[in-house]
Image (spheres, rainbow, N blue to C red):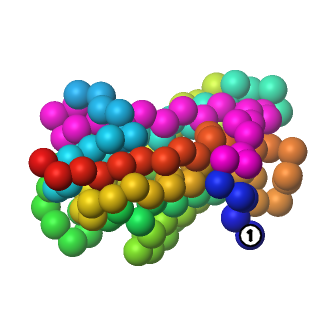
Amino acid sequence: GQPVVGDQLEVANVIALDVTYRLMNGVEVDPASLAQGTDFYANVRVYNPGTRGNLDQLILSFIVPSGWEIRTSRLDEGETPIKSSSYIYQDIRDDRVYTYFSLQTGEVKNFVIRLNAAYEGQFYMPGVSCEAMYDNTISARKQGSFIEVGRD
């Protein structure tokens, strides 16, 4: 199931998670209010401070609000200013991206997800989360929020 809107707490157990949003030229942008048609990307940073050693079988879940679309380099030739870190497997669906990976002790990985503010309106953006698939004591989550896509 999905948590009730606004009923999510930020969590950082064993791993740390940070999410920033940037325009394609690298300038940081507030995702709460974007003009329709804006191309941008989410940079999700996951860090293993090493309290439990190397971490395997991690999954990063990035669910996009209904007003945004995922843009993938598999379909177009656009480039982002930064590249994603290596991962084992990435499952890109219509409304979400699942990234499977491992983290060594002290390692930081940055995952880039290209997006477009496609549809006008107000939408709920679920929180970004990362967790170990088989150990529920390893997890990190950012709280969700409302976003708005307006006319240019």
Tell me: 55 left or right of 65. right
Give the answer, above or below, for where 65 lies relative to 141.
Answer: below
Q: Is residue 97 visible?
A: no
Residue 28 screen position, x and y as percent: 30, 28
- Residue that appears at 54% across and 45% down: 145
- Residue that appears at 64% across and 25% down: 106
Q: Please identify the quarter of the rendering in which residue 54 is found.
A: top right
Residue for badge 1 = 1
- Residue that appears at 39% across and 40% down: 32
Which secondary structure lies at badge 1?
loop
Q: Is residue 136 visible?
A: yes
Q: Amino acid type of disc 1? A: Gly
- Quick one: 68 or 11, which is closer to the camera? 68
- Quick one: 121 or 63, which is closer to the camera? 121
| Disc 1 packing (10 Å; few <14; some 14–19; many ≥20) | few
- Residue that appears at 22% across and 31% down: 26
Is 9 a magenta residue?
yes
Q: Which residues are magenta?
A: 6-26
Tell me: 122 left or right of 58. left
Q: Please identify the quarter of the rendering in which residue 59 is found.
A: bottom right
Give the answer, above or below, for where 96 lies relative to 81.
Answer: below
Residue 34 screen position, x and y as percent: 27, 44
Residue 101 screen position, x and y as percent: 59, 53
Is 13 a magenta residue?
yes
